[in-house]
């Protein structure tokens, strides 16, 4: 009997904190859910306007590649915001949410049993899931010097990183580019949190001084979910080596993986606007300024957390003990072991809650 695909996958991590969530919900002041990275702030007006204007023109199927308008917006955004190498339409592909890309990239690149996919040691679980879905072997490693020995087909890096917010500088990114090229691996750089750098400035792997002026062997993934507060619209894109994007486009056409036409029109408008991004940055910065000192005052140490939408906190104890203790205060956080064994003494505290819930959590920490 064939083994179900689900049998290759780990348990869905959030199912394991159902008990803690129940206790947090029962807290007299209500739950402060800081466990997930789901945006909760208003969708920018520019997105609502573009969506309203787009409806009548989309009776037919959209293209998998993305409209010429959205492709131009992507290329312009990468050049003006990230100082990318020169790119054209051939270097980009729109995707219906970047999580889908992460989960299916190994399969769509033709990987399978016998292939190695390198993922960060503390990482978003979907990198591992993507490797397992196609039967490849995921190996956690943060050292580019080890790539020759591991001989991977695909390497994932993530900066600013989920869950711990570490930002790789240009020298570190360059080392990954060199290592991947030396062993013939595809380097996939997840840059979905790039707009949120607090203590350091994020750098794209597509910057000329990082990639040697050419995107060969490189794919960079971006998302509007956090940048523009439109997670429910499901729009992201991948950019890089034209030979790789052409292969992805061909496979994705057969799979029907297309972004709805109205959402593509919204994405083009959002990519051309910086004001709403700065507004969202300031929201998260204010919340960070409330949560971090409250956690530190309650005996936590904050590690990394230079960027992204999370604080990587520890009290030097098993993360599940920390989760339970905070749940008793009505605060729900994500245990660090969701993201690998190296996170076993940390919790991820998200800033994606309302100002009122962030302040309530901080007050409970101050009064504990």
Image (cartoon, grey):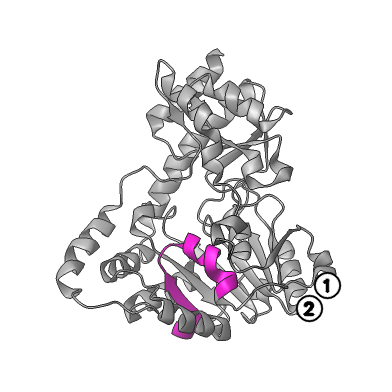
Furthest-left residue in this view:
56
**Measured from the top left, where is residue 213 in percent x and y?**
64, 80
- Viewer-closest of 320 and 78: 320
| Image quadrant occupied by the N terminus | bottom right
Residue 178 seen in render? yes
Q: Is residue 346 left or right of residue 333?
A: right
Q: Is residue 308 left or right of residue 55?
A: right
- Viewer-closest of 354 and 124: 124
Q: Is residue 29 left or right of residue 244?
A: left
**Measured from the top left, where is residue 8 in percent x and y?**
61, 58
Secondary-structure class at tag 2 = helix
- Viewer-closest of 336 and 213: 336
Location of mark 1 (residue): 148
Residue at image position (35%, 74%) is 70
Q: Nearer the viewer, mark 2 or mark 1?
A: 1
Cβ atoms under marks 2 and 1 closer than 8 Å: yes
Q: Identify the main secondary structure in magenta.
A: helix
Location of mark 2 (residue): 182
| Quarter of image, res 335 | top right
Label 2 environment density (alpha carbons within 10 Å; few <14, some 14–19, many ≥20):
few
Residue 88 seen in render? no
Residue at image position (43%, 62%) is 97
Q: Which residues are magenta?
A: 88-107
Label 1 environment density (alpha carbons within 10 Å; few <14, some 14–19, many ≥20):
some
| Image quadrant occupied by the C terminus | top right
**Measured from the top left, where is residue 187 in percent x and y?**
66, 71
Does the segment drawn in magenta span residue 143? Answer: no
Task: Identify whether 90 is placed above or below 43.
Answer: below
Q: Which numbered circle lies on residue 255? A: none
Task: Identify whether 163 is placed above or below 286.
Answer: below
Task: Identify whether 342 is placed above or below 268.
Answer: above
């Amino acid at each position: 009997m064939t083994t179900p695909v689900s049998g290759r996958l780990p348990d869905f991590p959030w199912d394991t904190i159902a008990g803690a969530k129940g206790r947090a919900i029962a807290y007299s002041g209500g739950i402060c859910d800081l466990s997930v990275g789901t945006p909760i702030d208003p969708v920018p007006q520019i997105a609502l306007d573009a969506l309203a204007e787009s409806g009548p023109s989309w009776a037919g199927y959209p293209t998998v590649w993305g409209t010429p308008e959205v492709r131009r917006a992507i290329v312009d955004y990468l050049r003006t915001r990230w100082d990318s190498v020169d790119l054209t339409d051939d270097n980009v592909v729109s995707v219906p949410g970047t999580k889908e890309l992460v989960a299916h990239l190994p399969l769509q690149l033709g990987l399978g049993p016998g292939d190695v996919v390198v993922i960060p040691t503390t990482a978003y679980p979907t990198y591992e899931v993507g490797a397992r879905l196609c039967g490849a072997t995921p190996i956690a490693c943060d050292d580019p010097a080890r790539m020759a020995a591991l001989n991977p087909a695909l390497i994932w890096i993530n900066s600013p990183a989920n869950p711990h917010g570490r930002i790789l500088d240009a020298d570190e990114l360059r080392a990954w580019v060199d290592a991947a090229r030396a062993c013939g691996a595809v380097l996939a750089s997840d840059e979905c949190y790039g707009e949120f750098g607090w203590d350091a400035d994020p750098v794209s792997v597509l910057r000329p001084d990082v990639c040697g002026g050419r995107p060969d062997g490189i794919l960079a993934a971006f998302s509007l979910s956090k940048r523009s507060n439109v997670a429910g619209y499901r729009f992201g894109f991948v950019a890089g080596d034209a030979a790789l994007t052409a292969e992805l486009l061909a496979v994705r056409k057969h799979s029907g993986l297309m972004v709805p036409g109205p959402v593509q029109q919204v994405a083009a408008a959002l990519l051309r606007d910086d004001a709403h991004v700065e507004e969202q940055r300031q929201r998260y910065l204010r919340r960070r300024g409330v949560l971090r000192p409250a956690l530190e005052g309650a005996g936590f140490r904050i590690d990394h957390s230079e960027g992204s939408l999370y604080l990587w906190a520890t009290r030097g104890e098993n993360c599940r003990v920390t989760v339970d203790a905070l749940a008793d205060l009505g605060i729900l956080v994500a245990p660090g072991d969701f993201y690998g064994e190296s996170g076993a003494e940390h919790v991820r505290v998200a800033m994606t809650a309302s100002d009122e819930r962030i302040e309530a959590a901080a007050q409970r920490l101050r009064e504990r």
